[in-house]
């Protein structure tokens, strides 16, 4: 074969998808700026899914209560799975759902872990209080970002999924958001994560931060 006619094989660069979402349906930014006042609470997840494809949820979203002391004590794994199943029915496919089990009892957490390992549960159960680690080398210095990495917790997180929670209690400047998206994608791609879930948790600016991130992503 004539080597002059041999062409180098072009390898398409790896690309890691990033989904953007908000921390909990009861987030003040959603209640104050997004949900219609007359929207029933049990319609919120369906309404939310019209504009976003990622949610970090919690027992508050299932109980519709911000006072969890009694609710957590009585919340059984079957109740949680039933609530998650209802969420999945309301939002359909193509939606990434994470559930923070940090406030649940240890027994309930372990039960959910075993259920997730044995079934094809379409929700990531994660203990944020135990599993998060700060990654200064990835995120811009101006932002406080905490990560859950696959294999780094005991709740059966699926391989090659990465959760990033942006903890800043402020509106993030576009230049900071752009840098965050670029650096998170670069890290995730080099580490062979197939997707990243990037959550904004600010009490009053999460909605603006998420919308701005979606806009920036569409222009990158």
Image: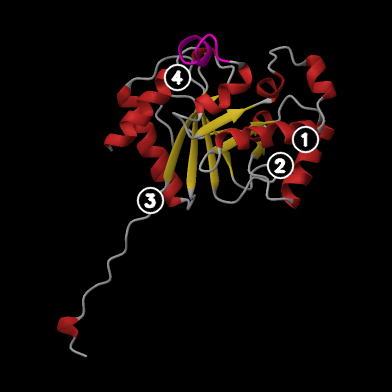
Q: CA distance from mark 1 to mark 4?
A: 29 Å
* Chief SS of the magenta region: loop
Magenta residue span: 30-39
What whole-number distance in Å separates the C-alpha atoms at marks 2 and 4?
A: 28 Å
Which structural element holds mark 1? helix
- Residue at image point 74% right, 34% down: 82
The kind of secondary structure element at disc 2 is: loop
Within 10 angstroms of label 3, few (less than 14), some, or many (20 or more) residues?
Answer: some
Q: Which residue is mark 4?
A: 207
Q: CA distance from mark 1 to mark 2?
A: 8 Å
- The one of 175 and 83 positioned closer to us in this rendering: 83
Q: Position of residue 199 (x, y in %)?
A: 50, 29
Q: Which residue is mark 1?
A: 109
Mark 1 residue crowding within 10 angstroms, few (<14) / some (14–19) / many (20+): many
- Taking the magenta stretch, the answer to whether it contains residue 31 is yes
**Labelled disc at residue 155:** 2
Which badge, 1 or 2, is on the more N-terminal residue? 1
Q: Nearer the viewer, residue 183 or 64?
A: 64
* Residue 142 visible here: no
Q: Earlier in the sequence, mark 4 or mark 3?
A: 3
210 sits to left or right of 7: right
**Circle number at residue 196:** none
Q: Residues within 10 Å of mark 4 (few under 14, many from 20)?
A: many
Circles 1 and 2, Cβ within 8 Å, touching? The answer is yes
Query: For the point 77% across and 45% down, which residue is it?
Result: 115
Of the two numbered discs 1 and 4 on the same chain, state the one appearing first in sequence. Answer: 1
Question: Which residue in the protein does label 3 denote?
Answer: 15
């Amino acid at each position: 074969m004539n080597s002059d006619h041999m062409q180098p094989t072009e390898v398409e660069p790896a690309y890691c998808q990033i989904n953007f979402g908000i921390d909990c349906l009861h987030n003040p930014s959603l209640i104050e700026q997004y949900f219609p006042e007359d929207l029933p609470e049990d319609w919120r997840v369906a309404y939310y899914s019209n504009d976003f494809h990622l949610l970090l949820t919690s027992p508050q979203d299932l109980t519709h209560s911000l006072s969890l002391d009694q609710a957590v004590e009585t919340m059984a794994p079957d109740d949680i799975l039933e609530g998650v199943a209802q969420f999945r029915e309301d939002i359909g496919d193509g939606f990434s759902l994470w559930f923070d089990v940090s406030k649940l009892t240890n027994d309930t957490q372990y039960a959910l872990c075993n259920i997730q390992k044995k079934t094809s549960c379409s929700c990531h159960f994660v203990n944020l209080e135990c599993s998060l680690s700060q990654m200064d080398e990835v995120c811009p210095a101006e932002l406080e970002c905490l990560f859950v990495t696959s294999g780094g917790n005991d709740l059966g997180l699926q391989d090659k999924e990465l959760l990033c929670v942006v903890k800043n209690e402020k509106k993030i400047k576009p230049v900071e958001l752009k840098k965050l998206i670029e650096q998170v994608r670069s890290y995730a791609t080099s580490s062979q994560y197939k997707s990243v879930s990037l959550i904004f948790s600010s009490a009053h600016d999460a909605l603006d931060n998420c919308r701005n991130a979606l806009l920036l992503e569409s222009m990158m």
